[in-house]
Image: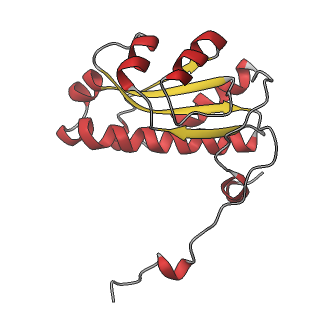
Amino acid sequence: MDVIEAIRQRRSTRSFSSRMVPDEMLRELVRAGALAPSASNLQAWQFYLLTDPVLVRKIDLFSPGLSGNPPVIMAICSDMEYASIHGSPNSEVYGCIMDASMAAENIMLRAAELGLGTCAVKSYNEAAVRKLLKLPPHYRMELLISIGYPQGAPRQRRLRPMEEMLHYNTD
């Protein structure tokens, strides 16, 4: 599958089969995330793979955006201590968010290529999820991604017409 095909096929998956994702596939997703561009090549990201069904269910309780009983949840965090030492002043605030977002897109496109479904989620109780993950205080949570084999066909998405969003030369 080429990149544009992965972009076209990728959908937010909200219903997953119970089939477990092999560890090597999960590692491949992290490798894809780590290949994302990073402001000043900072790479302050940290990837948490949650495969323990008990932990996944607990996180699900505090994450209204998660749905469909995903067998895997990935948490992408930024090491803000590392960012403050190695990055520019704006790296901490904006660069890490941008970096985590680009890593997430790489992860979701690679997942689509591997036949996996994903859904990026920002709606969660950060304090509760931080506690469950035992995150150090200097790690900032950026987003969660549910991962698994899709169950059922994805719903069609409506795309806005190009004319509504494209502007040339600001005229």
Residue 131 visible in image:
yes
Residue 51 location (% of width, % of height): 64, 16
Residue 109 place in picture, x, y as percent: 64, 45
At x 57%, y 33%, the residue is 66
19 or 116, nearer to the observer: 19
In the picture provided, is 137 more to the left or to the right than 8?
A: left
Vertically, is 8 above or below 91? below
Q: Is residue 36 visible?
A: no
| Quadrant position of the C terminus in the picture | bottom left
Task: Tell which of 40 and 33 is nearer to you.
Answer: 33
Count of numbered circles in the view: 0
Does residue 45 appear left or right of residue 95 in this picture? right
- Specify whether 144 is left or right of 22: left
Colouring rule applied to residues:
secondary structure
- Residue appearing at x 59%, y 25% in the figure: 73
Place of residue 22 in the rendered image (x, y in percent of width and height, measured from the top left) = 76, 21
Judge whether 128 appears above or below 122 on screen: above
Q: Name the residue rendered at 56%, 72% in the picture.
A: 160
The image quadrant that residue 108 belongs to is top right
**Residue 79 location, quadrant:** top left
Picture quadrant where residue 143 is located: top left
Q: Position of residue 137 (x, y in %)?
A: 28, 15
- Residue pushed farthest bottom? 171
Q: Residue at x 44, y 30 (%)?
A: 124
Q: Is residue 169 above or below residue 13?
A: below
